[in-house]
Amino acid sequence: MCNCLIWMFILLCSSVADENSIRDADIFPLSPEIERGSTLKLFCVLGKRYTPHRNASHIIWKLNHELIAQENYSIVNETVSSVTIRNFTYSKAHVKCFTKYLGKEQLLVHTEVKSGFPPDTPGNISCIYYFNAELTCTWTSGRETNLMTNYTLYRKVMTEERVTLPNTRNSCQSKTTSCSFYYPDVSYSSSFCFQVKAENVLGEASSDCVPIPMEKIEKFEPPEILSVKKITGIKQLLTVTWKMPEKIIPSQDLICQIQYRNMYSNSSEIVTVPLNSAEKTGSCNLTGLWDSTEYLVAIRCISVVSVFWSEWSRGKTASTEEKAPSEKVDLWRVIESSHPAGSRSVHLMWKLLNSFPPSGRILGYKIQYFPENNAALKMTNVSTDKKIVLLLNEEAYIISVTAYNSAGNSPEALLRIPSTDEKTSQIIETVRTFTTNEEVVVKWTASEPEVTEYVVEWYEELKTDPFGRSWQYVSNSTNWKTNKKNFKPFICYNISVYPLYGNKVAAPCSIQTYVQEKKPSEGPVADTGIPGKNEVTIKWKEISKEKRNGFISSYTIFYKPEDGKELNETVNSDVLQYRLKSLQANTQYTVYIMANNGAGGTSGEPKTFKTLKFNKEDIIFIALPIGLSMLFLLGLWITCILKKHVFKKVCWPDIPNPAESIAVEWPLDVSMNNSFLKGVTSEAKTIDFEDISVLEHCFPEESQEGPLLMNCENHVSECTDINTKGMSNGDKKILYNEKNEVAKCFSPSMPYIIADQDIRSQMHSALIPAKEIQPIEMLEDDLCGSQQTSIKNENDNEEVLKLEDLSEKALFNPYLKNSVKTREFLISENLSEHSKNEPRSQSTLLPPFQKNVAGQSYVTLDMFGLATAH
């Protein structure tokens, strides 16, 4: 029978394939769901598109990506192939049909196969009933089927003899293990039973019908708290009033629970209160509570026959009757330095003690203070804050602070403020701190053991607000511990310990600490200043306190020459400059500084500097000789300026000026009327240096005793006989100087110039403009005779004076000692013809020079210089 069914299925598949020949292939059954561990059989049908080139023998099968063995294949006909997979254990897998032709595989079709289990019988049916609102039941499904399973919940009415099957209104469908009936299908009955049926493709299972009385599964909404209040005049008591929900099964007694706890505790207490079915509200007094304490109250209720409590109601808070605070406040102060007017600011701050039971809600604080020696001057301030600033004078004051509420005041907290000139003793000798994994520990030693109470004060060093300080009183101990969470990491704290004796506060002992350190946030910046030849002074500033992150223990200076090895020097934390020595001259260095604390070090920016080629000593060594030389030359120059007259007198002595002589008068009229000078100055013509002749060696050497002067009187006749044959063109000078015996002779009125060899050399290097030659005033004591006059001869074209050899030597004239060695007689080109042709008879002969005889005519270098200057 089974084989017939299979063949019929194959034929059906073939007919379907023929009708759907437009498809490539088909697989049957499609998406099967089988029981896990069973055998799976699939068929693959080729479409006409693949025939006649391919047939069923070309079909291969794969499970997921694995090839199924050929022995599991079966060829039904030319277009149909089947595969058999035994013991299928995959929860989900893909079976694929391929064709393999000419060595190539081609996917035809595939399907997804799921395996699972038939459903187990549902069990543990339970329900919750909300009166006239909802009925919800839950159950357990047994093992997981891994297949789509549907559940049906039946609500049946039971009688004494039989069970009536429910109608469609008494069942509900679900795909989970829970199902609910909603109003109006939630009628109340005490004779219901509940059954669950589970089914999937592999089978179905049904539970027994379980009877559940509705009153036992009733659960109602939580009650509503109407009020929680205190009763005036009765302490430690609260009254709670609540209202029951309306949807409750009638004629059922109830039980309610009241849960309450104070706001300072996590534990709570419960009070049970019974209610009869007629009561719609309830009330209860909570006693034994703390005074002035706030409480949180919640309520839940249950029917006496039900197993389900309602949820807790929304909580409500209230406070018990207050009483006056029983503890004084924790009082402290910070005293600022005195102002110029003698007043000072005292910062008072306080906190409440953590006492149980607490003192209720504090309404404010009363601050009273008065001078220690005059209680009648008491002043009172009221504050709602826990701090105040008082402006006091230099006297000692007593200050008291009390907290108050509606029931009264707390005890006074007293504190004495010392006067400004009061000296307090140093009782605490040393203070030290250290940290553990969880705590900060402060220990100190006191010189007076009778002191048993101390105040430990701590605050961040960078915070200047006095109200930002924390404090704690310590009794009968010289150490104090607190949690590290009270301190911030990487922040410096000031910790001070104040001893208390009586109502006085002694001098504190302070220390700084870090509860945790890390490397500085930045390093110091180096300042190299002006380097020397082999050394440099490195300076730096302290890192700002907010960036230290710990106590700076040392500084390390790193320096490195260009293309050299890095060196370093370490100094203490109190050193802010260091001199690097033994550096190379004229070398560039890189330097940076590292600041170190307990957690590590951080370097600042590197700076470069270059050492000098010479230091100060080298410069002084070089400059000192130069400076001394310049000073010597400057001194010599100043000496020359100051003593120039002495040097001039020694090196260049003054020559007497005959023009200033008072021995005789100078015949100025003769000089002015000299026709020769007039002729020279009348025309602007340059006289060449060849127009001037110098007669040398007219006199003996200066070493000879007395110079020889020319005696014109002895040679007058010879001068008049000189003929003009030695002259050419009448314009040139006539010089007769041969073997020191020839001299030029001119008319007695013509000037002459006496020059030494140095002056003569200068004459050859300069041109003398004729127009600048001025008449030379004849000095009185330079004339050859006091009555000599110029003789003009306008008719003669040329006059030649010829002098014979000097027959005798003239005696020495003191005026001519240094200046007169030679005489030179010049004939100007500009002389008029009559002057040149003047008869000899009119010529006046020069008288001879005589020693110590006044009135003789002569011309010196001074006059020659005057002529050339003009």
Image (spheres, rainbow, N blue to C red):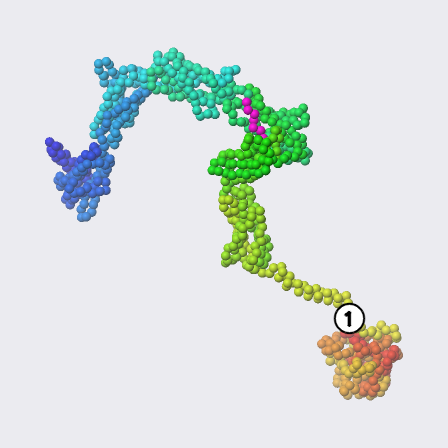
Q: Position of residue 619 (x, y in %)?
A: 63, 61
Magenta residue span: 326-333
Q: Position of residue 68 (x, y in %)?
A: 19, 42
Location of residue 303 by image quarter? top left
Q: Quadrant of residue 699?
A: bottom right
Local SS, label 1: helix
Q: Is residue 694 left or right of residue 537?
A: right
Could you say which is closer to the camera, residue 349 or residue 276?
349
For the residue pair 84 and 501, the one nearer the viewer reads as 501
Q: Report how many numbered discs are placed on residues in the image.
A: 1
Q: Examine the structure image and report whether residue 330 is included in the region drawn in magenta.
A: yes
Determine the residue positioned at 11% across, 34% down: 3
Q: Is residue 63 above or below residue 216?
A: below
Can you see residue 799? no
Residue 5 visible from this viewpoint:
yes
Which amino acid, mark 1? Lys
Q: Residues within 10 Å of mark 1 (few under 14, many from 20)?
A: few
Q: Circle 1 is placed at which residue position?
A: 648
Q: Nearer the viewer, residue 514 or 227?
A: 514
The x and y percentages for residue 255 are: 38, 16
Which quarter of the image is occupied by the N terminus? Answer: top left
- In the image, residue 334 sits, relative to residue 585, either above or below, namely above
Farthest-out residue, front? 449
Give the residue at x 33% y 17%.
Answer: 306
Q: Which quadrant is home to the C terminus?
A: bottom right
Observer-nearest residue: 761 or 827? 761
Along the horizontal axis of the image, is 145 left or right of 817? Answer: left
Image coords of residue 354 (percent x, y): 52, 27
Per the image, is 650 magenta?
Answer: no
In the depicted structure, whether residue 272 falls above or below residue 416: above
- Identified at 58% across, 53% down, the residue is 579
Q: What residue is at 29 percent from the left and 24 percent from the top?
A: 138
